[in-house]
Image (cartoon, grey):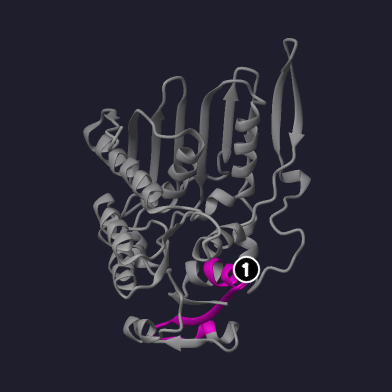
């Protein structure tokens, strides 16, 4: 049994990590760090509650520590966890800047522990569907890919740090990490990055809107998000030489996880047919449209991959190098937005 300690029981800890850890064989959610409340103990009987990081790190029975604290604290907390010789999963983004991620990566290698960024949206059903379409060549040669996550949220956030760029707030680091990670996993490293990163809502604060364009040899990727869209734009659009695919709506897992403490449904992650995307294919010059079933998503596969890596049965599902590449793209996006030109990608070792 792999005993897990969870740092933080806000949205990330409560909705994502705790239910997923509790749903994967050989994992046991054993302790949660909550500084003032006891919400975790109310939902998960038999766990320990710690008030400080020192107390949690002193518990040598914990094999894996999951960092689900606010973004601006990820680097320092993860550094202390690794220095204590513990394996670590860190919610996205792994750290605010590429240099911090590199420091954590080197430290984890030096201490001989696993460091895994929580890029869970690789296991969204709609993303898995897009990946299958691309790999099977259904649309011919892909010429354009659009991925966006829009919301209608004109008011101030209930978590003030999310509106403070110094503390890692802003939609670019938040949702941008997911969108860039998915794009790099699909298409590899881009040649250039151009972007607009803005504040659109009233008042001052962190960025709440971005559009990022990734340039490849023969295609363009566009990634975008904002807080002032209703209805939201399509989640995914793929265009190819033989047709296109359009998918609206969001993967249903996040909403479902907010209502449970453990996954027990055999239909987990499946979408209703009314939510499926649409394939438009060229049939001898005529376009034929049909619904295309969405692959069932399953965030449990992330933690199953972590388990297998800890037990020597496989590679980590996400690596610090993956997180570093995403952070570089986001940093180049900020540079492009400020300087208003395309930034060439200078990949180490390329």
Residue 29 in the magenta stretch? The answer is yes
Residue at the image point whose x is 62% and y is 68% from the top:
24
Question: Looking at the image, which residue sits at the far left?
Answer: 339
Per the rendered image, the range of residues in magenta is: 16-40
Using the image as rendered, state which of residue 86 and residue 227 is in the foreground. Answer: 86
Q: Position of residue 81 (x, y in %)?
A: 34, 72
* Left or right for 342, reference 124: left
Classify 12 as above or below 55.
above
Report whether 147 appears left or right of 8: right
What residue sits 50% from the left and 41% below the top?
A: 148
Where's residue 162, x and y in %? 36, 61
Dot 1: what SS? loop
Q: How many labels does the image show?
A: 1
Residue position marked by numbered label 1 in the rendering: 24
Q: Nearer the viewer, residue 29 or 35?
A: 29
Quarter of the rendering containing residue 273: top right
Can the viewer see residue 201 in this picture?
A: no
Q: In which quarter of the image is the C terminus?
A: top left
70 part of magenta stretch: no
- Residue 321 visible to the viewer: yes
Residue at 38% across, 56% down: 93
> Residue 59 occupies which quadrant of the picture?
bottom left
Determine which quarter of the picture holds residue 34. bottom left
- Which residue, as the protein is rendered here, is positioned at the far front? 312
Is the N terminus in the top left, top right, bottom left or bottom right quadrant? bottom right
**Residue 45 versus residue 349 in the image, above or below:** below
Q: Residue 241: give x, y in percent of width and height.
A: 60, 17
- The image position of residue 274, as x and y in percent, is 76, 44
Residue at left 64%, top 24%?
139
């Amino acid at each position: 049994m792999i005993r897990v300690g969870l740092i933080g029981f806000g949205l990330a800890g409560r909705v994502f990590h705790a239910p997923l850890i509790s749903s994967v064989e050989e994992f046991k959610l054993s302790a949660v760090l909550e500084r003032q409340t006891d919400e975790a103990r109310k939902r998960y009987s038999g766990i320990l509650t710690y008030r400080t990081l020192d107390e949690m790190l002193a518990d040598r029975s914990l094999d894996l520590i999951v960092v689900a604290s606010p973004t601006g604290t990820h680097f320092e907390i993860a550094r202390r966890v690794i220095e204590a010789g513990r394996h670590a999963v860190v919610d996205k983004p792994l750290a605010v800047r590429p240099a911090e991620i590199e420091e954590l990566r080197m430290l984890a290698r030096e201490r001989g522990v696993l460091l895994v960024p929580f890029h869970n949206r690789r296991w969204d059903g709609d993303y898995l569907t897009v990946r299958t379409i691309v790999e099977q060549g259904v649309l011919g040669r892909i010429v354009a890919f659009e991925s966006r996550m829009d919301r209608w949220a004109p008011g101030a956030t209930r978590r003030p740090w999310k509106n403070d760029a110094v503390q890692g707030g802003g939609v670019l680091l938040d949702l941008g990490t997911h969108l860039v990670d998915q794009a790099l996993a699909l298409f590899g490293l881009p040649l250039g990055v151009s972007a607009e990163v803005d504040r659109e809502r009233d008042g001052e604060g962190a960025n709440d809107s971005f559009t990022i364009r990734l340039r490849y040899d023969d295609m363009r990727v566009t990634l975008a998000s904002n807080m002032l869209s209703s209805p939201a734009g399509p989640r995914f659009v793929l265009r190819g030489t033989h047709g296109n695919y359009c998918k609206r709506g969001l993967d249903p897992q996040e909403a479902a996880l907010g209502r449970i403490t453990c996954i027990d449904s055999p239909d987990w992650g499946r979408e209703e047919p009314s939510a499926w995307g649409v394939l438009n294919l060229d049939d001898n010059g005529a376009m034929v449209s049909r619904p295309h079933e969405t692959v069932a998503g399953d965030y449990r596969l992330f933690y199953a991959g972590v388990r297998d890596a800890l037990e020597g049965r496989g590679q980590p599902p996400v690596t610090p190098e993956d997180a570093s590449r995403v952070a570089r793209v986001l940093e180049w996006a900020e540079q492009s937005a400020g300087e208003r030109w395309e930034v060439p990608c200078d990949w180490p070792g390329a």
